[in-house]
Image (cartoon, grey):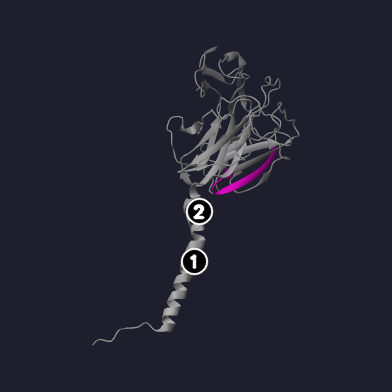
Amino acid sequence: MRDEQHIPTLVALVILVVGLGSLLFILENRTILFAKAVATSQPKGITITNVSDTSATINWLTDQAVVGYVKIREPGFLNGPTSYYDSRDAQVKFQKRQVHSVTISDLRPSLSYSFEIVSGTGSYKDSLLTVATGPTIDNPDQAVRPAFGTLVSDASAAIDEALVYASFEGSQTISTVVNQGAWVLPFGTLRARDVSRYFIPQKTDVVQFQFVHPSGVSAVSATIENDSPLPVVRLGQNYDFTKQKNVHAGPIVAQAQSPSTVSGSVVTSSEFKITSPPKDAAIPGQKPAFKGTGTVDKYVILTISGNG
């Protein structure tokens, strides 16, 4: 008769203790392990900017390049959500990105809207994800030059995509997206912090810029006297340009009087001329294309203002 093999009692106890410990660790940390697996698509640094009476912009970052869009719901139980995609995806929807910026439009004045962010395969809701539109107000009488500049990496390469935020003390925060290193922020329709009126910055008012990218952040202080253009910003470094005078040639400003018509007579410098669209032509859509002639090494800024 063959003798039966027995596991020594001490060895069995060790195996049992180790096995129970491993099981408890897995059970206690399953939520953390799962969270790490999906954290790459979770929105980070959600901000609400560019709030007006009919629109607002929602910005956020993700660790991994994913498709992201916003669902917004108008107050009322019978109203279904409306989806808005990144404006850069007008031609190609569902493009994967790490830097997300979605402008929601067709809103009603002086209302509070709740929204959710769809990022990757997840949908993120929170009671704090709300945006309140401001009242409808007349266009400002005073023109303010837009701020613009260039964002580069440590190797002086143009940053492809990043978020740019700007605000004055007492003003709302506005934002834009860096496009291959270049960015422009219009101050012509900047509102006060409560968005009930326009905010007209003075020459000595300090504007705080923040450049946000998944790989780094830069904080910059300047005034409207030296932000057109703002000196080149290197991502990850902070700057104070408040005492620095702008030695660059001033921009050539061509400002259209309304978003629906363009008149050659509004060009403020003979060094620049709009050739397309023609004078008083109707401009269909939200993204008009402009063509013109100008002087080499001069900056050209087209500002479109008004209600459209």
Residue corresponding to mark 2: 35
Above/below status of 30 relative to 90: below
For the point 63% across and 42% down, the residue is 210
> Percent from the top left, x then y, of residue 9?
42, 83
For the point 45% across and 79% down, the residue is 13
Among all residues in the image, which is located at the extreme front?
1
Locate residue 26 relative to residue 231 in the image: left or right.
left
> Percent from the top left, x then y, of residue 275?
51, 17
Quadrant for the N terminus, please.
bottom left
Q: Viewer-proximal residue, 160 or 251?
A: 160
For the point 50% across and 32% down, the residue is 83
Q: Viewer-proximal residue, 214 or 222?
A: 214
Picture disc at residue 24 = 1
What's the amino acid at mark 2? Ala
What's the amino acid at mark 1? Leu
Instruction: Indicate yes or no whether the magenta region holds residue 4.
Output: no
> Percent from the top left, x then y, of residue 272?
57, 21
